[in-house]
Amino acid sequence: MQVGGDHYRSMAIQPIEYILANRIEFAEGAVIKYVSRWRDKGGVEDLKKARHVLDMLIESEENVKAPPTSLGD
C-alpha cells in the first residue's frame, strides 16, 4: 500500500520493491527513486537530486579507492 501521492502507482514495480528485492544500498536506491518518479512528481528537480546523490557517491568511491599519499613527497 502506498502512502501519499500517486507518483508511483502507475509503475509495474514500485522503486522500493525493486530496491529491497535487490538489496540496493541507500545512495543507489535514492537515485533509482528520483529517476523513477521525475516525470510524475518533481520534474527536473528530481533529476538534479539524482545527480547530486550520484556526485556524492562518486566522490565517496574516489576517496575510498584513492591511493594513500606519501608524507615524504
Image (cartoon, rainbow, N blue to C red):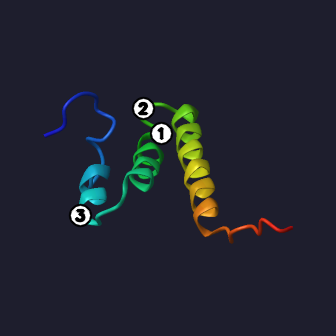
Mark nearer the viewer, 3 or 1: 3
Question: Element under label 1?
Answer: loop
Q: Label 3, label 1: how many angstroms apart (C-alpha)?
A: 22 Å
Write the residue at 42% across / 32% down: 41
The three-letter code of the residue at mark 1 reads: Trp
Kindly indicate whether the residue at mark 1 contacts the one at mark 2 (C-beta within 8 angstroms).
yes
Write the residue at 19% across / 31% down: 3
Image coordinates for residue 55, horizontal then vertical, percent: 62, 49
Write the residue at 40% across / 46% down: 33
User: Where 73 falls versus 55 (above or below)?
Assistant: below
Mark 1 lies on residue = 38
Kindly indicate whether the residue at mark 2 contacts the one at mark 3 (C-beta within 8 angstroms).
no
Question: Element under label 2?
Answer: loop
User: Where 30 falls versus 49 (above or below)?
Assistant: below
For the residue pair 61 and 11, the one nearer the viewer reads as 61
For the residue pair 12 and 27, the one nearer the viewer reads as 27
For the residue pair 8 and 70, the one nearer the viewer reads as 70
The three-letter code of the residue at mark 3 reads: Ala
Mark 3 lies on residue = 21
Label 2 environment density (alpha carbons within 10 Å; few <14, some 14–19, many ≥20): some
For the residue pair 46 and 55, the one nearer the viewer reads as 55
Marking on residue 41? 2
Left or right: residue 40 versus residue 5 is right
Image coordinates for residue 72, horizontal then vertical, percent: 83, 68
Question: Element under label 3?
Answer: helix
Mark nearer the viewer, 3 or 2: 3
Q: Label 3, label 2: how many angstroms apart (C-alpha)?
A: 24 Å
